Amino acid sequence: MAAHVRRLPVLALVASALLLTACGGTAHAPAAQAPAGAASSSAPAPGFPLTVSSCGVDATLDAPPQRIVTIKSSATEMVLALGAGDRLVGTAFADGDVPAPYAAAAKDVPVLAEKNPSSEAVLSLEPDLVYAGWESNLSADGAGERSMYAGLGVATYVSPSACKEAGYKPAKLTFDLVFDEITQAGAMLGEADAAATLVREQRAELAAVHPSGAGLSALWYSSGEDTPYVGAGTGAPQMIMDAVGLRNVAADVPDTWTSLGWEAVAERDPDVIVLVDSAWNTAAHKIELLEANPVTAALPAVQAHRYLTVPFPATEAGVRNVRAVTDLAAQLARLEEGM
């Protein structure tokens, strides 16, 4: 399925979306007006038209998108990192504050919703691209189905690392796959040079990291109180721990994340604990839980306060992963000095 990007009047977009919802059918876009992001000249932009595919859905852009809506921090920060922040018309589902290098470019962009926005809110901005970090962001329970946007001439893109269907879901996330998304996003945004520069810089930063050789095991503790939700063996947590030389105690679970009971955590007895820091579940709160829970309070890692921290937005595939490796490697080196 391919969506050709075209700009439609906002009322027509919203009316079509509402008609689709009411009738349960497929909305068909009116005749195309000027392509989104088209220059005054009739000559196409270099590299366009361009067809991009994500999670089995194709979208064809006739020109670099000029009105972009992002859902999830990973998507927002990708657009900002590639220098296209001035084309953001709306964001949603922020997992944390935008990091300092991009904060200025994002400060005046409207926030549509704390979580998934409604399709009406998205369409009211007349986007020519909706870029999401999760497949579920673009679903009937999220901001609307991708087929609905395609029928209205709006391109959609989902981070390939988040694909769930067989044939599209990565067997295991790697930095090469992260860099591939940066490259594809750069082409899609008309920022191929910026993407190439970013990939080159991140590869150099990653190569400069010296993984620990101590063979320490680690628990990646993301959320949960009665039962912790932890990084498993195929997603960004595993990729990051591999890069810093930590052995994931949940690596045997073939998924990105998993629930792991406290008794199982105690049995696996991690040498260090990586705490995901978020506004809704801070690293400090997790430490309180670990030290108050009789099952985990006896763990040597807890008694010795062998904790590392990582911000939540860095725990999903995106432009923050390499910096997370650099930061965690430095924290781990300091921790090892005191062991």
Image (tube, rainbow, N blue to C red):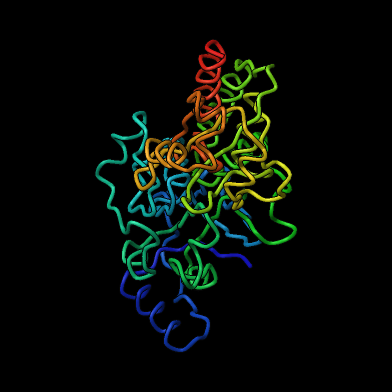
Q: Nearer the viewer, residue 225 or 34?
A: 225
Rendered location of residue 24, percent (x, y): 50, 86
Q: Nearer the viewer, residue 37 or 104?
A: 104
Q: Nearer the viewer, residue 263 or 201?
A: 263
| Residue at the image point whose x is 38% and y is 58% from the top | 115
Residue furthest left as drawn: 108
Position above or below: 71 against 118: above
Residue furthest bottom as drawn: 23
- Residue 51 visible within the image: no
| Residue at the image point whose x is 51% and y is 14% from the top | 334
Q: Quadrant location of the N terminus?
A: bottom right
| Residue at the image point whose x is 37% and y is 35% from the top | 284
Q: How many marks?
A: 0
Residue furthest top as drawn: 337
Position above or below: 277 against 63: above
Question: In the visual, does 83 lie left or right of 256?
Answer: left
Rendered location of residue 192, percent (x, y): 55, 36
Q: Quadrant location of the C terminus?
A: top right
Q: Find residue 175 and report its image quarter.
A: top right
Rendered location of residue 261, percent (x, y): 59, 50
Rendered location of residue 135, percent (x, y): 55, 60
Position above or below: 250 against 135: above
- Residue 214 visible within the image: yes
